[in-house]
Image (spheres, coloured by chain):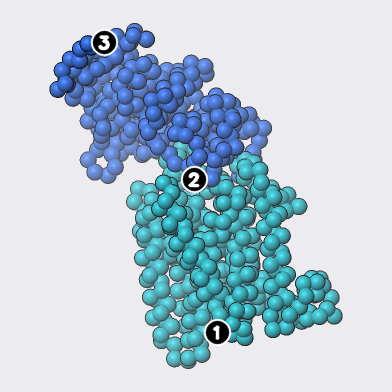
Chain colours: A blue, B cyan
Amino acid sequence: MTLGAQNLVLGYGGKPVIEGLSLEIARGKITVLVGANASGKSTLLRALGRLLRPEAGDVMLDGKAIASLSTREVARRLAILPQGPVAPEALTVRQLVAQGRYAHQRLLRRWSDEDETALAGALDATGTSDLAGRPVDELSGGQRQRAWIAMALAQQTDLLLLDEPTTYLDLAHQVSILELVAELNARDGRTIVMVLHDLNQAARYADHIVALRAGAIVAAGPAAQIITEANVQTVFDVDVRIIEDPITGGPLCVPATTVRGPQVSP
Amino acid sequence: MISGLRLRLLPAPAPGAARTPLVLVATSLVGTAAFIVTLGLGEVSVAPIDVVRALFGQADADGAFVVTELRLPRALVACCVGAGLAAAGVVLQGLTRNALAAPELVGVSAGAHAAAVVVIVLLPDLPISALPACAFAGALATSGLVYGLSWRRGTSGSRLLLVGISVTTVGYAVVLGVVSTVEDLIHASQLVTFMAGSIYGRGWSEFGAAAPWLAVLLPLVALSIRELDALALGDPVARGLGVRVEAARLRLLVLAAGLAGSAVAVAGPVGFVGLMSPHIARRLVGGAHGPLLATSVLIGATIMLLSDALARLAFAPIDIPVGVVTAIVGAPYLLWLLVRGRTNPE
């Protein structure tokens, strides 16, 4: 499964958000798109997942223009979870996750053993088996996000696209969702592309970072090479210092300016 | 047997809430009881056991003629109307992701009604069996209009609803305009009754006109249940799952128009049934559309049966329009929904 973009122009009718962007997603790796608000990172992800039709250029999935594939074909190779999805009232986790099987079913071939196996696997991988009978709208934010990820997993695709999967979650749940994503990548070699807001989380979980500014790629590569003081200044317009992450040894970025001055412990 | 029927007719994407079969059996029993009891009520009252005997063809049963020839066709029409409106409500609420979407709110009922009234006034000789097709055409035209006007790089639920309200207003203006040209006062008063929603005097011909629509459209909706389930998760999610969102929405909109159109053609725009039935059903079986559709249809039919019995009996011998009864019950229900919606963060 390969995913990439060639001379992509993306927009919503007005001035293009992204103009002439090309990109290759590394197979079996975690790629994280970072950038300031309105940098085009979510727009790019939506186009990669065929939720947005390019105004020009192509998204290429396995060597074919994704626009030429049927919605169902795409859904069997690539799962995309948009930002902040909302489940309808009184839908159970099991019922939600089961919908991940849509692209594998036919009008007259309904729920099969294969579907049941995929469903159980998705629940198991996300630690939501115990929640299967609970309504999604009664779960905590973190549990809910796990259920949505389970739905995407039930599609059984090698490619998984996640748009800000940690939004609205508290720190503990953010960490647990990102750990889950890392696990999904490590265990099955899934290719993962996600948009993250937090640069330090990106640094920790990405094999490959793509930094966008105003719809163009500023830098792309391994976290240690990309997260530099100069790049962060360009991408986010913030003066930062890069220090070593005491846990991973990777880059950790802290803002350099504060009116409060150094805090000295007594 | 009931749950077996559900599994054959409505295979949900996956077995859902465990109590669905129980709820279906219970609602079927309540519906059947309501059917039998209300058939016995009226100027000539017939005991339930005699109603059953009459229904099974024992012509010598007490009141057999009243039951099978006068009340039965009207009760069957009530069931068709309630089931059709409820099913249309399930579809519309699912695809707009809006709990307030009901045939009468997104312009579908208004379009059906306007077309029916125009046809009744201009072509008084048209047979009743042609009326559902006309109402369907009106419903289709308005739902197409609503869909077209609310389409802007996809269709958002709230825009659909706002355009629907405008179209409804225009539809009722057309109806009022056409009715005001009718000089025959008796005919005009019949049309006004029709405006409120009534099945007074409806018989076998109306049943024959409405039932085939239901028999064809309900299975078609059942075949689109998975698309409806996916659309209820929002357009981007549905598309990511592999659903051709615009095509599926259009298909479901046409089915909803047909269901509501055939109901409105024989009963006028009976309010609140299409809104209430899916809500009650959702509380009983949850949000998956397979169980929801089956339960809503049963509840819609039961609500119409009971409402029509009240309409017949409350001020007997005056028959008030059944739409008045559903409005008296339904309006407070809608208000309660709104109040609950305000205190509930969702």
Residue B125: numbered disc = 1
| Residue B219 screen position, x and y as percent | 63, 55
**Foreground residue among A190 and B274:** B274
Residue beneath disc 2 = A88
Three-letter amino acid code of the residue under disc 3: Ile
Residue at image position (23%, 27%) is A213
| Residue A2 screen position, x and y as percent | 43, 23
Three-letter amino acid code of the residue under disc 1: Asp
Residue at image position (37%, 10%) is A247
Q: Is mark 1 on a helix, strand or loop?
A: loop
Residue A243: numbered disc = 3
Residue at image position (73%, 83%) is B44
Question: What is the crowding at mark 1: few (fewer than 14 residues within 10 Å), some, or many (at least 20)?
Answer: few
| Residue B43 screen position, x and y as percent | 69, 84
Vertical comparison of B197 with B105: above or below: below
Q: Is mark 3 on a helix, strand or loop?
A: strand
Q: Is residue A56 visible?
A: no
Q: In which quarter of the image is residue A96?
A: top right
Q: Of the residues tagged 1 and 2, which is closer to the observer?
A: 2
